[in-house]
Image (cartoon, rainbow, N blue to C red):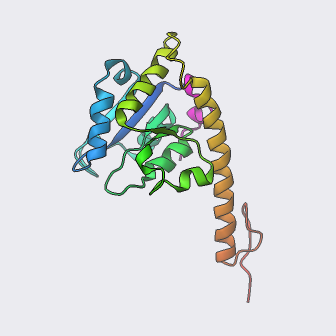
Amino acid sequence: MTSPAWRGLPPASRPLLWSWAGSTHRKWERIEMVRQLSAAPGLLSRGALQELAGFKSPGMQSPMRYSDLLHRSALVPVPQGVACEQFRLYEALVAGAVPVVAEAHRHTCMAHVPLLGFKVLWVSTWTEARARMLELAEEEEGGGGGGGLRLADLAEWQAHNWARYQHVMDLVGQQFARATGCVGGGGGGGELESG
C-alpha cells in the first residue's frame, strides 16, 4: 500500500527534499552518489540517506516504511546498481517524487523514460546533482536558490509524471487484458472470453 497522506503534496510541502536507501556494495555509481550527497551538510540535513551493506541486511526498512520515505521526499536519486535500469525509478514515480538520474543512462537503459514522457532531473555527474539539490534546499529556506531549477518546476514535473504514470498503467492494463483474453480491458470487472 502507499502513503496517501503524502502523495498529493507538492515538493515544497514534503518533509524531505530527497531520500535514498540502498546498498552500495560493489556499486561504484551508488558509492559516488552517497559520497557527493553526504559531503554537503546543508543537503544531508534536508534528506534521508540509509546506506545498507546489502540486500536484506540488518537495518533494512520494511516495504511500508520505505514507501513512506519515498512519499515524503521531493526527489529520489536513481544511481545505477548491479543493473543500469532501476526499479527505484518506478518507485519514485509512484510516490510522486521526481527521480534524479545520471545523463550517461539517457540513451541506454533509461532510454524509455523520455519516450514514455516522464520528467526526471538529468544530471551529468553526482557532483552536479549535489549542486542542483543544494539550490533547491536554499530556496526552501528562503534563500532564493541559484536561479536554475525551482521547487515550482518540481511541482509541475510531479503532476505531469503522475498523469503520465496513470496513462502508462492504463495502457499496460489494456494490453494485459487483451493478452489474457479479458473482455473490457481497462478498469476492472472484465470477463474472460470463452472460446
Is 163 left or right of 74, judged from the image as shown? Answer: right
Residue 7 counted in the magenta span:
yes
Quadrant where the image shows the C terminus: bottom right
What x and y, as percent, mark residue 2? Answer: 54, 43
Location of residue 147 with respect to 183 vertically, above or below: above
Instruction: Name the foreground residue: 44 vs 61.
Output: 44
Instruction: Name the foreground residue: 186 vs 192.
Output: 186
Location of residue 189 with respect to 86 vertically, above or below: below
Location of residue 182 with respect to 33 vertically, above or below: below
What x and y, as percent, mark residue 79? Answer: 37, 45
Residue 16 counted in the magenta span:
no
Residue 3 visible to the viewer: yes
Instruction: Name the foreground residue: 154 vs 174.
Output: 154
Task: Please name the residue shown 28% across and 38% down the image.
Answer: 32
Instruction: Name the foreground residue: 170 vs 85.
Output: 85
Q: How many marks?
A: 0
Q: Magenta residues, as a range? A: 1-12
Task: Please name the residue shown 61% across and 36% down the image.
Answer: 157
Task: Please name the residue shown 26% across and 46% down the image.
Answer: 28
Location of residue 139 with respect to 4 vertically, above or below: above
What x and y, as percent, mark residue 103? Answer: 44, 44
